[in-house]
Amino acid sequence: MRALTILFLLLSVLTVSCTETDLSGPSSNDFDRQAMLENWADNIIIPSYEAFSGHMATLHADAEAFTTTPNQTTLDQLRNSWETAYLSWQNVSQFEIGTAAQIRYRDNMNIYPVNTTELEKNIADGSYNLSLPAENDRQGFPALDYLLFGLSTNDGDILDYYTTHQNADGYKTYLLAVTERMKGLTDTVLDSWKAGYREEFVQNSGNGANSSVDMMVNDYVFYYEKVLRAGKIGIPAGVFSGSPLPTHVEAYYNQELSKALALEAIDAAQAFFNGEYFDGNGSGESLKSYLDFLNTMKEGADLSNRINTQFESARSQANSLSSNFRVQINTDNSAMLSTYDQLQRNVVFLKVDMLQALNINVDYIDADGD
């Protein structure tokens, strides 16, 4: 019993020494959470969705143009729209709250690797229901990645799938079904924010597991840990499997976009942490200002500065990678693992130190061995 008591006291000391908050300073209850929620909703989340919705509308329109007149010009235009929308997606993927959570928006938009066997079966059968959870890995950006870049190794043969192939109509119909569903889901999420969820989100400014701050912060940390760190880097680099999985990189078939998507995601995550407006013209109350308000220190330095410094380190390491993560993994996977390590350091700062300082409990269960 005495040994257990001593162990408890040691753990208590270690916990306190990890993140120090000025005990004589303000209470977390004194921070203006509603102002932070207003900044998140009005200057970051809704404008991000508005921009992404515009890109989705263009993507679907270009898919209609391509399937009406399949040629190199319309294919190139559609590919450009896909790339623009995919980059824009990185700014909204982290906001899986409200209607987005209810419809499992992210699962429908960006589960990779795409299941090409089942996708081809859908096209061959001509009968599918993309709203079923089992269809998540046969739609969204990864499905378009395959349909626009992966059907063959040269553009002439890819165009044949939409022109002379015996089931060309099936490929065209499936392509349109995917972009139409992505556009519809996006409009549903954006409309919910504008039709009342924004007010519900902002007014729910208290503390507790069901408050907007607690839920949003949990969603944000989950996104950073599981979707950005693990999904874009750790899983394809083999961190969780013991051997590299180059087929699991984002935008596998395009081959030139995986790094750009990861960098865009890092930028978006850091901008949200700092409360920066989506249009880049200002900033408001944020997780950074919340931590600064509480005078949160870690090992003698502001925790918010440590988090931002770590974002910069992760971005710098990611910038050193090949634009094609498949190539990077096959030629020098150690650089991918180093990027993972840089991202992982901020998991500790965000998930342990920040949540402790903000008195927010983690509401999800780890499943990747962390």
Image (spheres, rainbow, N blue to C red):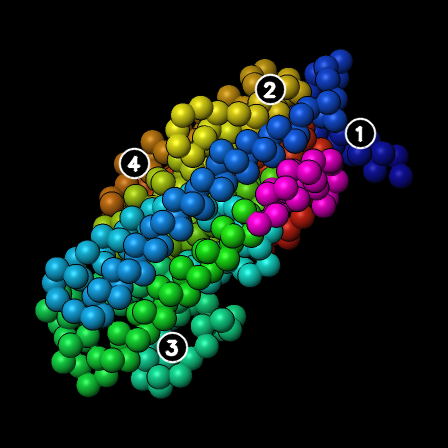
Q: Residues within 10 Å of mark 2 (few under 14, many from 20)?
A: some
Mark 2 → mark 4, Cα distance in angstroms? 29 Å
Question: Measuring 78% from the left and 34% from the top, which residue is drawn there?
Answer: 7
State which tag comes first along the sequence, 1 or 2.
Answer: 1
Q: Residue extending furthest right?
A: 1
Marking on residue 9? 1
Which residue type does callout 3 highlight?
Answer: Glu
> Is residue 152 located in the magenta-colored stretch of the structure?
no
Instruction: Give the camera-side residue of 145 and 9.
Output: 145
Mark 1 → mark 2, Cα distance in angstroms? 28 Å
Mark 4 → mark 3, Cα distance in angstroms? 35 Å
Which residue type does callout 4 highlight?
Answer: Asn
> Is residue 210 located in the magenta-colored stretch of the structure?
yes
For residue 136, side relative to residue 219 (left or right): left
Can you identify the residue that label 2 sits on? Answer: 292
Locate residue 280, reporting x and y percent: 39, 28
Q: Residues within 10 Å of mark 3 (few under 14, many from 20)?
A: some
Locate residue 185, reporting x and y percent: 47, 60
Can you identify the residue that label 4 sits on? Answer: 319
Secondary-structure class at tag 1: helix
Question: Measuring 39% from the left and 48% from the top, which residue is drawn there?
Answer: 52
Mark 1 → mark 3, Cα distance in angstroms? 55 Å
CB atoms of marks 3 and 2 within 8 Å: no
Question: Looking at the picture, does residue 146 appear above or below residue 210?
Answer: below
Question: Measuring 24% from the left and 45% from the top, which residue is drawn there?
Answer: 323
For residue 208, side relative to residue 98 (left or right): right
Mark 4 → mark 1, Cα distance in angstroms? 43 Å
Which residue type does callout 2 highlight?
Answer: Asp
Secondary-structure class at tag 2: helix
Can you identify the residue that label 3 sits on? Answer: 118
Residue 243 in sight here: no
Q: Which residues are magenta?
A: 195-216
